[in-house]
Image (tube, helix red, strand yellow):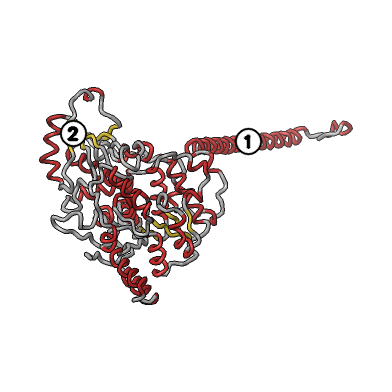
Amino acid sequence: MCKSEDFEKCDYRSEGKMGFKFLGRVKKLKSSILKTNAWLLIIRAIVTALVWASAVQLVGIWLIRGPSLFKVCPPCTQLELPAHAELAKLPIPIALPPKRVYKNNGYLMVSCNGGLNQMRAAICDMVAIARYLNVTLIVPELDKNSFWAASEFQDIFDVDHFIASLRDEVRILKELPPRVRKRAVYSLPPISWSNISYYFHQILPLVQKYKVVHLNKTDARLANNGLPLEVQKLRCRVNFHALRFTSQIEEIGRKLVRILREKGPFLALHLRYEMDMLAFSGCSHGCNNDEEEELKRMRYANPLWKIKDINSEMKRLEGLCPLTPEETALVLVALGIDHNVQIYIAAGEIYGGNRRMESLKSAFPNLVRKETLLEPSDLRLFPNHSSQRAALDYLVSLESDIFIPTYDGNMAKVVEGHRRFLGFKKTVLLDRRLLIGLIEQFSSGSLSWDEFSSIVKEAHADRMGSPKKRVSIADKPKEEDYFYSNPHECLQLLDEPLRST
């Protein structure tokens, strides 16, 4: 630049050139700054969009899965229940199968009879029959007149799950539609142990004629064998998937298993020595005179129990009676069961009370029951509902490390089959006829303890619920293996082949 004192000597052309150069640099700098600001604005906009998108996604997940997803997971040592039991707590929506579309031939109503597990098997049979006949099944009515005083279907089973999970097989309604309620209902007891052709040729024509047919007896009304594979698999699907207990029963069942698991492995003992069983079977070994008379009066007072005059000792020697608590203690010790193991008594009130349980308690001090493990508030959820409490025993028996029934009644058989389905879990199937003979010999002194124990162990080494085929006996369905104790058509077999013995 020219100073004032050198004004006249200044070369304005050179100064002008320098000014224009400076202005050019300023313009380039401004342009560069503008471009940089534009890129920063673009980057900021992208980052902001990503942040908002992430926030929206997180809110959506929270709304769907609930706040529990964000809770801190407890230590692994506290997760004692099987994975399926814990996952069941999460409200994960399950995709329903598509509805099966078919021409409806009419409506089938059924009234189940017996205890919980007899009715459970009957429900599976009735679903299979309804599917094969292309009829609409009305939710089965449970027995409320028997000794067991059952609840309504929805008091024990998740009725909505039952209906929805089978919609691709058969239409099930909670009640008859209004337009058919005034029609005459044809009621009959189907023939026991019938094959599927009986229902097609005898029952279906009745449904087509009357539109509503009521089967008033359902125990063992479908054969064990000789049925189409699809029918057998549907019976399994109903039993293992569609018949889910209510959320209240499932929750208390999980609580029982959690309490037991916190103290280690446990054995579930189905000690079938309740008053109703003894009165019905006529088995009174070990009872005093007053108790024998009480059981006899109960048997004669029940019109549904047809056989009244029973020789208790003869029946016992044939292996047709449940083991007594004293006999059970001997057998468990002979089998080598750990004296310190937890034994969960999966049964109702034992007849004779503490007096009859002394031997078992002495040999295995860690005897527990749902009444001793649960809070009174938990048990008050099931007042006077023996079937609901039996459902708790069923759940615990499924989860036990070992299951041992002392009588092959309906619960013993159905739990055995369910444990096979769960991976052939260890189930000790006692040979009662052999055991009673051995106990008599041991008690008389003709067998030493070592001999007694050795024979018991050897005899039951192959009676642990391993894979095998059902024994089928033509024209003698009562003597052959029960379908629900070993539904081998539905089982995932292990490496060893099926045996027929």
**Quadrant of the frame with the N terminus:** top right
Where residue 245 appears, as percent x and y from the top left, is: 38, 43
**Where residue 233 appears, x then y in whole percent?**
24, 50
Element type at marker 2? Answer: strand
Type of amino acid under label 1: Asn
Q: Specify whether residue 170 is in view.
A: yes
Amino acid at dot 2: Ser
Q: Residues within 10 Å of mark 2 (few under 14, many from 20)?
A: some
Identify the residue shown where x is 47% and y is 63%: 364
Q: In this view, does 90 lie to the left or right of 12?
A: left
370 shown above or below 458 = above
Which structural element holds mark 1?
A: helix
Dot label at residue 37: 1
Query: Residue 273's x, y, as percent?
Result: 37, 54
* Occupied quadrant, residue 3: top right
- What residue sits 42% from the left and 68% below the top? 333
Residue 328 location, x and y as percent?
Answer: 39, 62
